[in-house]
Image (cartoon, helix red, strand yellow):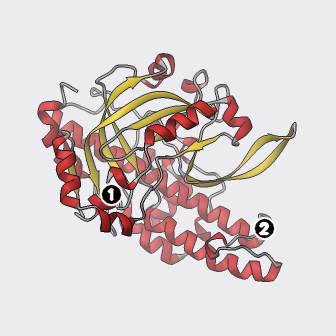
Amino acid sequence: ESDVAPLKEKLTQALFDHIPVGVGSEGIIPCRSQDLEEALQLGVDWSVREGYAWCEDKEHCEEYGRMLNADPTKVSSRAKKRGLPQMGTLGAGNHYAEIQVVEEVYDKFAAKKMGIDRKGQVCVMIHSGSRGLGHQVATDALVEMERAMGRDGITTNDRQLACARIGSQEGQNYLAAMAAAANYAWVNRSSMTFLTRQAFSKVFQQPADDLDMHLIYDVSHNIAKIEEHVVDGVAKQLLVHRKGSTRAFPPHHPLIPADYQLTGQPVLIGGTMGTCSYVLTGTEVGMRETFGSTCHGAGRALSRSQALRELKSQDVLAKLNAAGIMVRIASPKLAAEEADEAYKDVESVIETCHQAGISKKTVRLKPLAVIKG
């Protein structure tokens, strides 16, 4: 933290300059149609091949950064058109890149395995996904699935809950397209990791490797995956939907990296701009009780429109400034939408998950600087 303090303004600006933000923002990672097709198929393997990710990064991604059942031919041309210019972009809404500092270490052993076991240590947390491409994949699937529901006699009480039988053509098409969108998300986040490393290297005038800018973990927040879980004492293959939740696998699980076999999988939980974020680990209780899942953040307390009515962006920014938190936001009104008051108390949410035993507190981080769309 003492290294960053005198350069905080410069670092914040460098990060904002390097990572494109905002609705419809366009990336600076060169991406032709052929590149996009390969990225949808290969995920982080594409980033490694193109020099945007380190080989070791792949080890620290959920699914090693690549869903093998991805089929780019199931992604519509409209979705691809939206995704093509957005490679390596943050987007808007609740997406962010934050420079954070370790404030509290709860589990020394797990934190040491992750390499963040010292108070005052600086990290960067990035929250983003598959951007316009993933949104379009979902929109396309809703249309297909609504037709399938009519054909198969399936009813739900909400249009947004459109669904199809897993084994149906629509179900299989969606899983293949969603996997391709997940691969795009890994490429997008790894591209921003590359840009973050570049920004820090530029400011500190040292290679990212010397600055110890290693990836701790990359985990998804919206994804459906076929996994094996024990139900009533019987091992079953299930399609686990994690919508606004995070995979949190326990120690010794075969699908988590060798580095984290003794600690359980790292779980990244974003708080709000002025509060704190957490790194947790997965547990055996979570594996039994919640299919190896935990929360993914604080969750909204106010809708966006309500937040805009009740809060003023300039007040929110002034409060953050008074707390010594640097902020760069492309759209000023987003400050009110994303204010601390618009969200539930992240500490209560984390404590609930910790007490329930579905994930375990490891590290608390407070923000030094926030980049948003």
Amino acid tagged 2: Arg
- Residue 243 pos. (x, y %): 59, 56
Amino acid tagged 1: Ile
Earlier sequence position, callout 2 versus callout 1? 1
Quarter of image, res 270:
top left
What label does residue 165 carry, if any?
2
Q: Secondary structure at mark 1?
A: loop
* Looking at the image, residue 291 lies above or below residue 285: below
Quarter of image, res 69:
bottom right
- Residue 48 pos. (x, y %): 44, 44
Quadrant of the rendering where the N terminus is positioned = top left
**Residue sitting at the far front:** 310
In the image, what residue occupies the spot 44% across and 74% down?
81
In the image, what residue occupies the spot 56% across and 42% down?
62
- Residue 257 pos. (x, y %): 58, 31
How crowded pointer 2 is (Cα within 10 Å; few <14, some 14-19, many 20+) is rated as some
Of residue 210 and residue 3, the one placed in the foreground of this image is 3
Of residue 258 and residue 275, the one placed in the foreground of this image is 275
CB of mark 2 within 8 Å of CB of mark 1? no
Of residue 326 and residue 60, the one placed in the foreground of this image is 326
Would residue 166 be seen by someone viewing this image from the given angle? Answer: yes
Q: Would residue 1 be found to the left or right of residue 27 on screen? A: left
How crowded pointer 1 is (Cα within 10 Å; few <14, some 14-19, many 20+) is rated as some
How far separated are the C-alphas under marks 2 and 1?
Answer: 38 Å
Q: Secondary structure at mark 2?
A: loop
* Looking at the image, residue 265 lies above or below residue 218: above
What label does residue 29 carry, if any?
1
**Residue sitting at the far top:** 109
Q: Would residue 125 be found to the left or right of residue 80 on screen? A: left
In the image, what residue occupies the spot 22% across and 46% down?
320
What label does residue 53 carry, if any?
none
